[in-house]
Image (cartoon, rainbow, N blue to C red):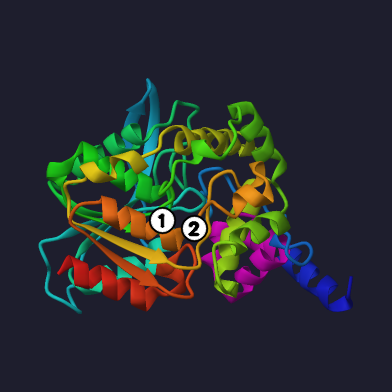
Amino acid sequence: MTMETMKKILLGLSLISVLGACPVQAQNTGTAAKLVYATITKTEPGEYKLPLGSAMEDFAYPFPVQFLPLTNEGQPVRMAYMDVQYDFVKAPPRSGTIVLMHGKNFYGSYWERTIRSLAAQGYRVIVPDQIGFGKSSKPEIAYSFDLLAANTAALLDALDVKKATIVGHSMGGMLAVRFARNYPDRTEKLVLENPIGLEDYRFKVPVQTTQQVYESELKNTRALNHRNFLKTYFVEWKPEYEKFVEVRSRVALGGEYPRWAKAAALTYQMIYQQPVRHEFGLIQTPTLLVIGQEDRTTLGRGAVTPEVLKTLGQYPRLGKEAARDIPNSKLVEIKNVGHIPHLEAADIFHKALLDFLR
């Protein structure tokens, strides 16, 4: 340990005694407090040591977070969401409301740039953390896309929203398809951004028990492993993506990590056991497909041989096949972009989205 590092640690400890150990308080106190947060969080390059609760209590979202009380399978739960009204200064209000649905390994806050882009154009933007994810409750229940779609409809009811455009990324794309199928009268338009589920994984990925998936999640605690996994989503890894590694790594240090891991295992099974690919022809809503052409994301990456893996997640082909099967659909292909266009190619993604909305 260098002398400079020792000085920072001593400074951090002295500041903790003044400010308190709560990272939320520290972050809101000023520059000196941010140093405390950085010093006590990272222990060695690429690793973290400050725990984060399973509901990400100390992780700041870009807009105020509210909670909707629900009952799922007899259990009281709380669904976190952001409700961002249009920007009065930059644009006159439009009549449209947009719902953004996150992927399995993410949560509502990663939509920040998209939220700002839509609000600047006069749209109202609603961004839920689905039950089992982000700041929402993580009960041990039988997760289903029907349940999550019903929860989202209940949120729209509570906010007095009759109809909305549904935008889904990754796993959120599968949920968006199910929402559009179950609530066609409430779905203005449908946008699918590199959705998983463009193929039925059961044909090639072997069955795993929930216990097997759960034990795998429990073992996946190293930041290095999660960083390497997330790098498969992007053509180019950028420092701004490190926050996704930090959240996952710090949650793994918390006392409620087993609850988080069990929810992750159960939602894995939801994706595997409840394909939506065979419903594409039944979608009644005008649909935009945005596909980053370098994406090779698939479920069960570690459970198949390298030879089988090469046949999965072929998004250039899968996107074309989906556009062929979804009535009244438009396909936008983005070159040199991976799994998350709204992060990697935000300007291109937002232009395609806004053009479609108009």
- Residue 314 visible at all: yes
Identify the residue at image location x=59%, y=43%. Answer: 300
Q: Quadrant of residue 110?
A: bottom left
Left or right: residue 8 versus residue 265 is: right
Quadrant of the image containing the C terminus: bottom left
Across and down, in percent, residue 346 comes to 39, 74
Across and down, in percent, residue 310 comes to 60, 55
Assign the magenta stretch its main secondary structure: helix
Left or right: residue 197 versus residue 11 is: left
Q: Quadrant of residue 335?
A: bottom left
What SS does tag 2 mark?
A: loop
**Label total for image:** 2
Q: Amino acid at mark 1?
A: Leu
- What range is drawn magenta here? 15-40
Which disc, if any, is residue 165? none
Task: Give above or below for 117 relative to 58.
Answer: below
Task: Give above or below for 345 relative to 112.
Answer: below
Identify the residue at image location x=45%, y=59%. Answer: 315
Badges 2 and 1: C-beta atoms under 8 Å apart?
yes
Reading the image, the residue beneath label 1 is 318
Identify the residue at image location x=43%, y=46%. Answer: 199
- Graded by Cα atoms within 10 Å as few (under 14), some (14 to 19) or many (20 or more), the crowding at tag 1 reads some
Separation (CA) of disc 2 from disc 1: 6 Å
Across and down, in percent, residue 284 comes to 16, 46
Across and down, in percent, residue 47 comes to 73, 60
Reading the image, the residue beneath label 2 is 314
**For this rendering, which residue is in front, 199 or 37?**
199
What SS does tag 1 mark?
A: helix
Q: Amino acid at mark 2?
A: Gln
- Residue 61 visible at all: no
